[in-house]
Image: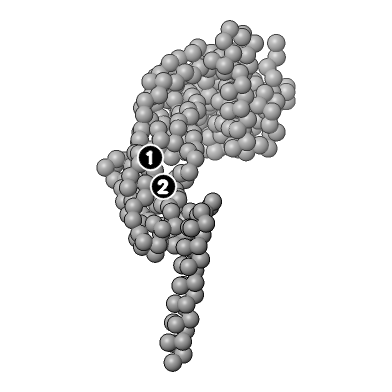
Amino acid sequence: MAKRDYYDVLGVSKSADDKTIKRAYRKLAKKYHPDMNPGDKAAELKFKEVTEAYNVLSDPQKKKMYDRFGHAAFEEGFGQGAGGAGQGPFGGFGGFGGFGGSGNGGYQTYTFTDENGNVHTYKTNAGGGFSGFGQGAGFGGNMGDIFGDLFGDMFKGASSGGAGRQGAPSRGADLTSDIDVAFDEAVRGCEKLIRFRDQSGREHSLKVHIPAGIEDGKSIRLRGKGAAGPAGNGDLLLRVHVGERAGFIRKGRDIYTSASIPFTTAVFGGEALVQTVDGTVRCRIPAGSQSGRKIRLRGKGVPDMKNPSVCGDEYVTIQIQVPVDLSPEARNKLREFEQICKNDKKRTRNGSAA
């Protein structure tokens, strides 16, 4: 059965940006994840399909190859010919031969047939031939620049002149996955058990340390946990998504929250209980505090990832409670207070006029 277009799999257009592609993948991965659909083989295949599509479209180089050659760019033996085969950097993109000509002097003509059957011909000067792309890759003469024109910067500068050289074996492809952590977990750090599937569809379990202070959108690189390759495994990149916590806003290493205090505490001063990520603390409220005043709690913010002993601060915005459901006695006292304040203002104005 022919593979579906990767853009159709994720339900996005070819002009979709990285954020749109990521958002579409997360929605579908959550919908079809095996943990959400135990025993459902159809859902398992869907999950594998959307993961495969995302691994290609989220990688700029793979996406460029897919946009140009489609699924053929990742099929075994793609472009094999006179140049020979090899393990390419895209996983499954085995070799890029398909070129005539040996580069033995003078001008040489090279031909390449794309996935649509179109033949491309290039004439180059002497200086060696092309020995295949990937494991055993070698570029001679100005072939590197020609490939640069055809495929972009990926091949620019590959030419070194002289005979084609044998390249080093490539390591396996990097894999990407996402992990969700709670607001407090990102602040304090935690251990997470994750499950992910590699490009062959095998499921893996892995215990991951989430460092204290990590920010939303940052990635954790797990070396050697990616796809296998001739020169070793690639890496696994975990994109961290930090959840929200009601009443708290994080900006870098600082945390912002608010505290509601009684009217009398704002007038006379005193203490108020304030929530922090480490629990409840007592905070001193200066007399005469106005609504909207900010109080700084030093060291109650987020630890620095590189130096956990250094923490940001927490800023508490004061909100004054307005008395409600007053008794007749309390209401009369407030009326007396209001009248006294008015008389004080009059005396102040009269004193200033005198």
**Label 1, residues with CA under 10 Å away: few <14, some 14-19, many ≥20:** some
Q: Please report the residue visible at 40 percent of the width from the left and 52 percent of the height from the top.
A: 315
Q: Nearer the viewer, residue 18 or 304?
A: 304
Q: Please report the residue visible at 43 percent of the width from the left and 50 percent of the height from the top.
A: 259
Provide residue 250's location: percent of width, then percent of height.
44, 45
Q: Amino acid at mark 1?
A: Val
Quadrant in the picture for the C terminus: bottom left
- Which picture quadrant has residue 29? top right
Mark 2: which secondary structure? strand
Q: Amino acid at mark 2?
A: Ile
Quadrant in the picture for the N terminus: top right
Q: Nearer the viewer, residue 157 or 245?
A: 245
Q: Is residue 146 visible?
A: no
On screen, residue 349 versus residue 304, left or right, reads right
Count the marks: how many? 2
Provide residue 274's location: percent of width, then percent of height.
38, 46
Work out how far the residue at label 2 is from the one at label 1, CA to CA, in angstroms. Answer: 9 Å
Please name which of the two marks, 2 or 1, marks the residue nearer to the observer: 1
Mark 1: which secondary structure? loop
> Mark number for residue 277?
1
Q: Which residue is mark 2?
A: 255
Could you tell which of marks 2 and 1 lies nearer the N-terminus?
Answer: 2
Q: Nearer the viewer, residue 353 or 50?
A: 353
**Label 2, residues with CA under 10 Å away: few <14, some 14-19, many ≥20:** many
On screen, residue 332 versus residue 284, left or right, reads right
- Name the outermost residue toward the left: 309
Q: Please report the residue visible at 44 percent of the width from the left and 82 percent of the height from the top.
A: 348
Q: Is residue 296 visible?
A: yes
Label 2 close to label 1 by CB (< 8 Å): yes
